[in-house]
Structures are given as structure tokens and as C-alpha cells.
Image (spheres, rainbow, N blue to C red):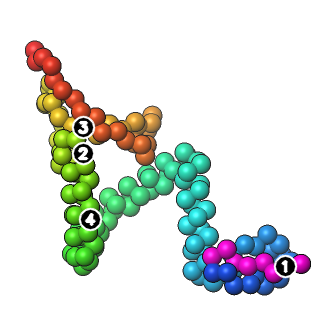
Amino acid sequence: MGIKRCLACGDPLPLNSRIPDQTYCSCQECQRERRKLWQREKKLLDPTYREAQACAQRAWAERHIDYWHRYREQHPDYADRNRSQQRVRNASQRSGSPIAKMDASPPTLPLPSGTYRLELKNAEGVAKMDAYTVEITVLTTA
Ligand SMILES: [Zn+2]
């Protein structure tokens, strides 16, 4: 009978009859890896879980409104990297349109021509993860 090894660090797993299906050792890093992979798969396969996670993340972001602002101030390399990556994304878009605003003001009618972010919302008004970038061209105005 071969020795079972931790899927993360490769160390031999201790024999433990109470956890016969153990695949990760108990070290903090490996347990974090195990949970991360579990969550990634759960998000992929369970739309309810995925929505709940996105909802909780939005709620957290609203409670910690200045978190990312402070993070970017304290990590200028991160901010620079994001900025240059966003420039690449913008350039790869056909129109090279700027980033969509999160707190967009209510549109005036009729909508002006432009690029819009289209999200499917459920009955509670919570946006699902999937979003489309659509271009709307106004053909006639009343
Ligand atoms: Zn391990």
C-alpha cells in the first residue's frame, strides 16, 4: 500500500482512520488551497452559491467603500499594473471606449448612441455574474 500524499505540498499524509479520504495535510497553506479550489468549483457549478458570493462581495464593498482607494494608495505598483492592463483592454475593444461607470446617472431618453454594459438581473434585482458589452446606435429620434 502506497503512502498518500498531500495534493498541495506533496508531503506524506499521516494515517488517520477518522479521516480516511483526507487529501490535504493540516498545514494552514494547504488547507487554504483546499478551500480555494472547493470554492472555485462550487462557484462554477452552483449558480445560487455564485450569486450569494457576488452579493456578499458587493455588500462588503459597500461597507468598506474606501478599501480599494486606500489599497491602491498603499500599493502603487498594483495600481500602475491595473492601469496599464485596463489600457490594453480598452485598446482591444473595437471602439476603444472608456471604462463603464459603476454609479451611472439615470439615462436621458432617448438613450444616446454608445457602448453599454448589459446585465441580467434576477427577481430580487441582483445582477448575475454574466454581463455583455453592447453597442446601441440610435437610428432616429422623436
Ligand atoms: Zn500539504
- Which part of the image, by quadrant, shows the C terminus? top left
Residue 127 lies in the magenta-colored region: no
- In primary-sequence order, the first of circles 2 and 4 is 4
**Which label sits on residue 141?**
none
**Residue 102, horizontal then vertical, whole percent:** 25, 49
- For the residue marked with disc 1, what is the amino acid? Gly
Callout 4: CB less than 8 Å from ligand 1:
no
Which residue lies under the disc numbered 4? 82
- Residue 66, can we see it? no
Mark 2 surroundings within 10 Å by alpha-carbon count, few (fewer than 14), some (14 through 19), many (20 or more): few
Q: Main secondary structure of the magenta part?
A: loop
Measure the C-alpha gap from mark 1 to mark 2. 53 Å
Marks 3 and 2 in Cβ contact (< 8 Å)? no
Marks 1 and 4 in Cβ contact (< 8 Å)? no
- In primary-sequence order, the first of circles 1 and 2 is 1
Mark 4 surroundings within 10 Å by alpha-carbon count, few (fewer than 14), some (14 through 19), many (20 or more): few
Which residue lies under the disc numbered 3? 116
Measure the C-alpha gap from mark 1 to mark 4. 46 Å
Measure the C-alpha gap from mark 2 to mark 4. 17 Å
Magenta residues (range): 1-8
Q: Specify whether 69 is left or right of 140.
A: right
Measure the C-alpha gap from mark 3 to mark 1. 57 Å
**Which label sits on residue 93?**
2
